[in-house]
Image (cartoon, coloured by chain):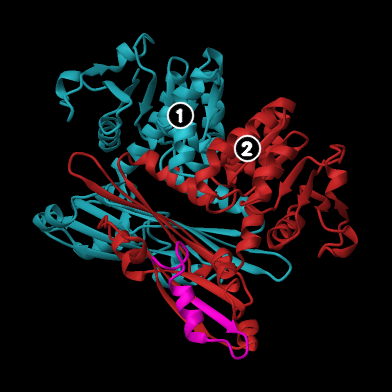
Chain colours: A red, B cyan
């Protein structure tokens, strides 16, 4: 019996989830659900597109709904709503609002006996799990998180909103010297500026004031003002040719000590990803498998990656896992 | 209420566990148990040493017993025996015998409602967990495990058994070219010889035939014959000065693809450890915390790192974990 997956939202992440389901032999993609007119969407796999109005009736034959919406406005509303109807999973990443989101999903899911996994992906997600493992093993240790080199879609969007900008791509780049100091166990105190730089490629509209655009980017609060930012103006052709992918990655590096003589230990978890949405989608699908299993075992309520035993992510049996991976 | 820990066996690993308990505010070391005469052992922390005869009565006031014995003969007998009396954890690492060991511990622990975690540490242990996570996220991916640079105690012991050898230290060294090929996503097929080399430092007895010793090492089946091995003869002073530590580490590197266009992803988990026994002891103590909690929640039987949700390793609450680590 295959696990039946529904995908809500068909942007980059939704398509990444679709690809991950196609590569999972124990899973079956039932439908993509969208608020848009279903006739306007053609899925890569050819799976049917269904209106969210139908989904809201709560009668869809799916084991887990993977919700691929934005953290700002979509997920705070969608995840609790659908957690009352289906087992759900999302990639909510607005850190300050996680307690409220967790509480909302927990209440909705528990009321009807469903599982709702929130904040899943690689950060939050696999990076979080690695921070937790390392800091639990090494009390008093320090965990450093570096992102990149990779495309930040939020920062790219912020540049696109500037007057005179046609297209933009922003790469977050970790500072090599900072990475090396951390890996060497030097336990540095690092400011925002010392950890990452921001590298921007911008296609300007014809006749636009490039100096003004560059200045608006570099002084933009929260997004760029606290970083060393480089702005490169390029042609549309160059953007298409050199910057069409969505690579990302980064490292969680934990340094700590043990014993009476202060033995040093460095734990590094590093991701190098050709496609951020496809990897994130793959993480969501593995945890969707866990969501269904936990629910089948009688569990309900909101969960995060912290609450889920790794064995639940794999289609293999405990015996097979001990044989092959232990 | 602190979690009460007992340590069975007081070699390098037992002392590593002792140090880890001392650094864990929520834990208390009750006693070290030994088959040797308790009066002959002085613990680093000053904690009492008690005979295993007393432990076998099953009346010790401990929440978890950390069993620090050898996998060849100690653990197959000890872990099931004590799992019938206490929650236990071990670092059993004879891979081929894990199914039998798991079954034995499971039966003993379930009969009396205890938890028995087996094969915990970093490999098996944290490396296993990382293989499982990455291979579950990326179906069809390939996980490569490299060890070192670090001291292999088993290989050092094997050299010490050769006639004319006074002392020896063997370092397992990963082959840099192999590591780089894997990190680059080239998915190489690597023979044993292509993955690791073996570097030996040997103190010979006066007048011993060095050429014979070197030949005996290099041709030793299983241990050295399949590897490129370097043998260096050094003085006792050099051994003491340069090779008294027990550093170790290594990497699990998983490379896989997603999507219809074969996007590549590389996941690396890397450990660089000043002290193998102190880090292993720290992993055991974090999982001892989980063992007690699972048992308090009504669970019993044999478990591995695969079966344990990461949140159980930390003394922090779910709310604190979501706030600080997610």
Q: Which residues are magenta?
A: A200-226
How many residues crowd mark 1 within 10 Å: few (<14), some (14–19), many (20+)?
Answer: many
A215 in magenta: yes
Q: What residue does disc 1 label?
A: B290
How many residues crowd mark 2 within 10 Å: few (<14), some (14–19), many (20+)?
Answer: few
**Can residue A316 be seen at all in this image of the molecule?**
no
Q: What residue does disc 2 label?
A: A319
Between A260 and B11, the residue placed more toward the observer is A260
Q: Where the N terminus of chain B falls, by quadrant?
A: top left
> Residue A20: horizontal and vertical position, in percent?
71, 57
> Residue B246: horizontal and vertical position, in percent?
26, 49
Residue A247 lies, with reference to residue B161, above or below; the image says below
Residue A286 lies, with reference to residue B22, above or below; the image says below
B305 in magenta: no
**Can residue A149 be seen at all in this image of the molecule?**
yes
Mark 1 vs mark 2: in front? 1
Q: Quadrant location of residue B17?
A: top left
> Residue B55: horizontal and vertical position, in percent?
33, 14
Q: Residue furthest bottom?
A: A207
Q: Chain of mark 1?
A: B
């Amino acid at each position: 019996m295959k696990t039946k997956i529904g995908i809500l939202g068909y942007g980059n992440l939704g398509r990444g989830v679709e690809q991950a389901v196609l590569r999972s032999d124990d899973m079956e993609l039932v439908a993509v659900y969208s608020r848009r007119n279903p006739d306007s969407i053609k899925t890569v796999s050819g799976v049917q597109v269904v209106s969210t109005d139908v989904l809201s009736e709560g009668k869809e034959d799916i084991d887990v709904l993977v919700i691929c919406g934005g953290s700002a406005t979509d997920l705070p509303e969608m995840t609790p709503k659908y957690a009352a109807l289906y087992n759900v999973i999302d990639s909510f990443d607005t850190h300050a609002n996680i307690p409220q989101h967790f509480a909302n999903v927990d209440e909705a899911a528990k009321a009807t006996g469903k599982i709702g996994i929130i904040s899943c992906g690689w950060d939050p997600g696999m990076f979080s799990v690695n921070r937790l493992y390392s800091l639990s093993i090494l009390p008093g240790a320090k965990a450093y998180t570096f992102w990149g080199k990779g495309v930040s879609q939020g920062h790219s969007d912020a540049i696109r909103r500037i007057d005179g900008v046609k297209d933009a791509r922003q790469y977050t780049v970790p500072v090599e010297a900072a990475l090396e100091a951390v890996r060497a166990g030097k336990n540095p105190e690092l400011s925002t500026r010392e950890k990452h730089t921001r590298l921007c490629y911008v296609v300007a509209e014809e006749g636009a004031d490039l100096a003004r655009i560059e200045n608006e980017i570099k002084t933009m609060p929260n997004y760029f003002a606290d970083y060393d930012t480089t702005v490169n103006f390029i042609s549309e052709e160059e953007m298409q040719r050199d910057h069409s992918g969505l690579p990302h990655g980064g490292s969680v590096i934990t340094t700590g000590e043990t014993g009476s003589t202060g033995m040093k230990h460095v734990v590094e978890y590093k991701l190098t990803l050709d496609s951020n949405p496809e990897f994130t989608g793959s993480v969501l699908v593995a945890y969707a498998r866990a969501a269904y299993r936990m629910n089948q075992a009688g569990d309900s309520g909101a969960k995060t990656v912290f609450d889920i035993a790794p064995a639940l992510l794999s289609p293999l049996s405990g015996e097979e896992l001990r044989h092959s991976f232990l």
